[in-house]
Amino acid sequence: MSSDVKTKILISDDDLTARILMKETLSSDVLEVIEAANGKQAIEQFEKHHPALLLLDVSMPEMNGFEVCETIRAHKDGKHIPIIMVTGSDDIASIHKSYAVGATDFIAKPIKWPILGERVKYILRASQAFEDLVTQQQELHQLAFYDTLTGLPNRQYLMQDLQRYLAMAKRNNYQAAMLYIDLDRFKRINDTMGHSYGDKLLRKVALRLQANLRDSDMCARTTKDSESQATQLSSFGGDEFTIFLSRLNNSNEAMLVAERVIRSFSTPFQLEQFEVVITPSIGISVFPHDGEDAESLLKNADTAMYFAKESGRCCYRFYQDSMNSKAAARLQLEQDLRKALDNNEVVPFYQPQVCAQTGRILGVEALARWQKPQGQPIFPDEFIPIAEETGMIIKLGQQILYHACQQAKNWQQSGHAIRVAVNVSGHQFKQPDFPNVVKKVLETFQLPASLLELELTESVIMSDAEENIARLKELKALGVTLAVDDFGTGYSSLSYLKKFPIDILKIDRSFMCDINSPPDDIAIVEAILALATSLNLGVIAEGIEYSGQITTLQNTKNLLLQGYLFSRPMASEFISPLLQQNFNHLMP
């Protein structure tokens, strides 16, 4: 107890002599005694000073001790405060009534003054221990049922409440809804700005959601049965939140709340000197149609949220029965892919890259293909996103690199020294040991580094330009060729582009056009070609499907052409015969 902050004790007695004696007995360096001459004053002094203990005479004018005790126990700050009643020595009825109105203890008159001080001291000590216990229980409850970052109720709290509200909804035959909210691309905030900024953003998101729900017309609506309606905002940790709407007239009301949440995110979040824009994807499930218990309602809202992300993000989707079957199929595909990588079922197919001047194949691009031992092939659009999300893309990328280098060595030994291009994912490229992985594969097959090309997308190399320049230089030091894939679709800065040790720009297929295309489309291609020429870079134009597309490219130096006009991606045994061919007859 701090010596400069005294513990306050309130004594209330209409006998001035008794008050003086009590004050003399109890006052000390750590105790301050406050007096009241009647019950009404006792209430006033309690509300003004918030004492740690009260001594109340039973017989007082205006309000007796019993009435004061009852009043204080009903007060928001008086539930646990120690109250000692001072009664006549042979007044047994008063003693019983003291406990009945909530007194902690009693003292019989005449008072033994030396004992009073000790009694008060030990009651205060017991009261402090009880207060510490209550505080500890409150802290444990906070940790168990509330998110430590945002202060919002957590999953455990929500599930506890959901059971009660769903039972109420079922009994009264009305609808309820669960909104499952996930922040789109939140990971990039932690990756680019750091976790401290990510935490600040989550706290601001929680505050905005709370403000949004408070302002909502729906949440402000009142009903006769106040217990039957509640709007519960919860945090599931990380970047996931839920909103439970306990009473709906129809599902459109859930839709209105979802739309309101999405609109509220249109205003950027201010994080110190930065303005951050982030969007929510929301899944909605409705009771009882989408689930009659808390777990199924929550699971189905979560499933709907993933479909909102697949639909382009920053939107909401209501749960549909077909979603679960699709989610189950996706989970099965993930498990199958894991086994496929263990069994080397994912292999490269190769698509030729033809020199525009000679008509000869100078390179091939290795493209991942998954052919199940018994069954139809799985298209890359189906399994590559799963590999990216689960981290399996690193293993997949290493296997394709291994097979491609092995095949390049086989072609070299058969007299065809052609370059093999391998796509590198962002996850793979950011691995600290990636340059060493490439080096070991080249050494394993004794493949000249000039016969390996690594393709990285424009958005990957620009994600952390300064760090990526250093890593690209490590790879370039090995002697491999470096290409920027999908050029023109990202956000390259020309100042950085000059610093990157790259050799080739690969024009995205979306820009491929012919002389009959709109002038703006042709101008974009010509600008990319002029940029490549000024930086002395080679060019690969992909997506070539007919000869007319080559016309706008013909005067480009170091130009390779890739597309269905020459060949679809094929297994290595079908590529080998093409290496002898000349494709000049397909040139305009």
Image (cartoon, rainbow, N blue to C red):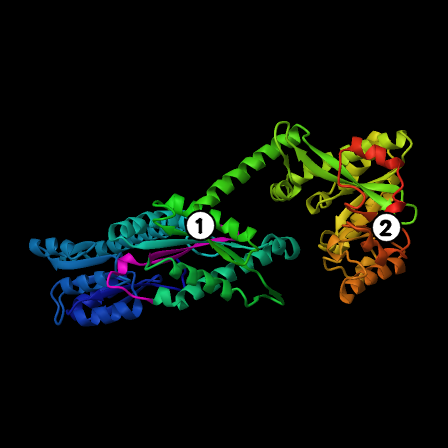
Instruction: State the residue at coordinates (88%, 49%).
Output: 356
Q: Looking at the image, is 306 positioned above or below residue 20? A: above
Residue 13, magenta (yes or no): no
- Which residue type does callout 1 highlight? Tyr
Residue 260 coordinates in the image, percent (x, y): 46, 65
Q: Which residue is mark 2?
A: 503
Q: Is residue 58 left or right of residue 529?
A: left
- Residue 28, quarter of picture: bottom left
- Residue 352, quarter of picture: top right
Instruction: State the residue at coordinates (83%, 48%).
Output: 561
Of the pair 94 and 332, the residue shown nearer to us: 332
Residue 572 coordinates in the image, percent (x, y): 79, 33
- Which residue type does callout 2 highlight? Asp
Does any portion of residue 419 appear in the rendered image? yes
Q: Secondary structure at mark 1?
A: loop
Does any portion of residue 502 appear in the rendered image? no
Instruction: State the residue at coordinates (22%, 62%).
Output: 74
Residue 243, magenta (yes or no): yes
The magenta region covers 221-247
Residue 94 coordinates in the image, percent (x, y): 9, 57
Of the pair 85 and 372, the residue shown nearer to us: 372
Q: Is residue 159 left or right of residue 183?
A: left
Mark 1 is surrounded, within 10 Å at the Cα level, by few (under 14), some (14 to 19) or many (20 or more) other residues, namely many
Q: Which mark is residue 374?
A: none
Q: Secondary structure at mark 2?
A: loop
Of the pair 246 and 570, the residue shown nearer to us: 570
Residue 319 coordinates in the image, percent (x, y): 44, 50
Q: Which mark is residue 319?
A: 1
Of the pair 150 and 363, the residue shown nearer to us: 363
Q: Is residue 493 left or right of residue 39?
A: right
Q: Is residue 109 left or right of residue 150?
A: left
